[in-house]
Amino acid sequence: MKPKLKILIVDNQKINRKILSRFLSDFYEIIEAENGRSALATLRSQKGTISAVLLDPIMPIMNGYDVLKEMSKNPEMAAIPVIVISQDNKEDSEIKALQMGARDFISTPYNPKILRRRLSNLIELYQSNLCIGHIERDTLTGIYTKDAFYRHATEILGSNPTTPFTLVATDIERFKLVNDSFGSATGDELLQYIAKILQHDSLQLHGICARHSEDHFMILVPKCADDENMHSFIDAAQKELNQFPLNMKISLKFGVYLIKNLQTPVPIMCDRALLAAESVKGHYEKSYAYYDDSIRQRLVREQQIIDEMKSSLEKNRFQVFLQPKYDLTNEKIVGAEALVRWTHPKLGALNPGEFIPLFEHTGFITELDEYVWNHTCEILESWNQKGLPHIQVSVNVSRKDIYQENLPEIIWNIVKRHELQPSQLHLEITETAYTENAGQLISVVNELKKIGFLIEMDDFGTGYSSLNMLSELPIDILKLDMRFMNSIKKGALQKNKHNILEFIISLAKWINLQVVAEGVESKEQADFLCKLGCNYAQGYYYAKPMPVDEFTKLLNNSDIEIPSIPPNC
């Protein structure tokens, strides 16, 4: 037997509640409340189960009009049909009740058949709307789905052509890592938590909110989002997000699209807001961006780079260039750094500063690094076969490479295949790799040291754990961050930067490390570094990165010095 729907009768007069109950109890399950406060408590405790409310407007403690006012503040309660039942048949009372959200108004004496018919019609409409609502709602978060958002946003914009609206896309930074590290159940809880925050904030601004895709949310608000408003909105959302119980920093990235042309379809508006949000992912100092066409152009260019990276690797379009390193005391060549160059088939020669960060983001950097290691070892093997000096060449090991458990084995196999000694291939790691995952880096570096590789710490001085890192990592060489070189200009070196540079070089000497300065562009810089005791330098003052053939000629025509670098085990 199908269970009866529940009806809430709210009247301070017991006799009135009994009369209405007698009319309706054969068709509905009756719940009674004697005042407005009790009625609201019942609606909250019976959440989602009350199909209609019969409400007396005149009651002690809390009257029916106040009940309607409170129900209107809650989206779920506001949807429940309310029939105001009153002994007052004045037109003003009926208008007031209907204005405050009542669906119907019936005055005494009640006609049971009419009352039941009106109630049945309202409940049928309510349930139809509930079905539509369920279809429109995301099953996990309870907020609008993407398609429902498109539909409602289109209706809202069409109905308010003179009102300024803003579309805001939200993206969760490193959401995949949450699922990988803590499980999909925790990831789902995080999505629900964020949806609740954004739903509340959008309602406060009289807007709507949706889950657009897995970890993307969309908000439409009737307001121009200037910097001050965006800062307030983001700060409030991030503050609430920080309360989520997870042993990991979670941050949101926002893309803002200011709606100026109502003829633009809502899905395209959403795509543009998402492009703006995507543009600040990985930028820790920025949490939001406004969409403009330069973002679209940049992301189109990035996609062109991504589309060609694998085929370019297969077709050897990436080239290894070498930049020599010099001894600062006698200006003899002591080694080189292998750098990658790429001529894109459509975009031409690309700056590594453009494609390397993108490759790190996609994970392709691990394939490119292995390609460079192989080609560098081929070059070293060729030099050995020609009887050239066994100079040492350094190659980059990216942060992503460190997460490969078999990294030492991969590099060792490449070196063996080309009949090289590990000491000929220096491995450059970055300080940021230590700050991201110190334990993993220490473990990998120890394994590489056991094999016989020499380790260079690249970009030293950019992080926050430098001194602690030096005590834990068995490195051999420090490479100073290029930004130190930028400060060494005639009359421009600040005293505090001078002191820091002098301290780093002295510290390196004290713990038996060699120091390399990169980015040296003038004799003044070279002389200053030599005076401080820096060992080696590379930069445009000495030579630019060059193709292998050109570097080989340089080796044949230059004085070479093979440095003796004692392993710092």
Image (cartoon, grey):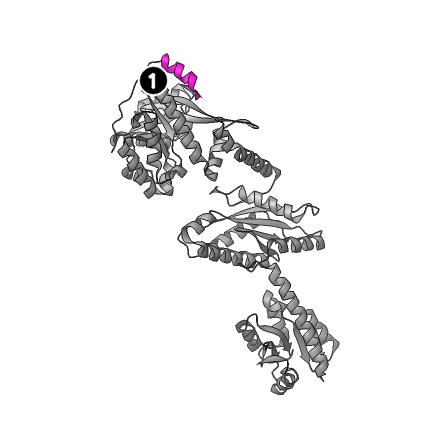
Comparing 410 with 488, the one in front is 410
Residue shown at 58% from the left, 55% from the top: 210
- Residue type pointed to by label 1: Gln
Image spot of residue 257 (x, y percent): 61, 46
- Tag 1, which secondary structure? helix
Q: Is residue 419 above or below residue 286?
A: above
Give the residues drawn in magenta, as a range.
544-569
Q: Is residue 456 magenta?
A: no
Numbered label tally: 1
Query: Is 180 situated above or below 520?
Result: below
When the figure is inspected, residue 507 is found, relative to residue 65, above or below; the finding is: above
Which residue occupies the extreme top position in the image?
557
| Residue 558 on image: x %, y % | 35, 13
Left or right: where does residue 351 sit relative to residue 411?
right
Circle 1: is it few (<14), some (14-19), or many (20+) Cα within 10 Å? Answer: few
The image quadrant that residue 347 belongs to is top right
Q: Which residue is mark 1?
A: 385
Q: Is residue 568 magenta?
A: yes
Image coordinates for residue 312, horizontal then vertical, percent: 50, 29
Viewer-closest of 523 and 11: 11
- Residue 444 percent location from the top left of the image: 32, 38
Q: Above or below — where is 172 with respect to 512? A: below
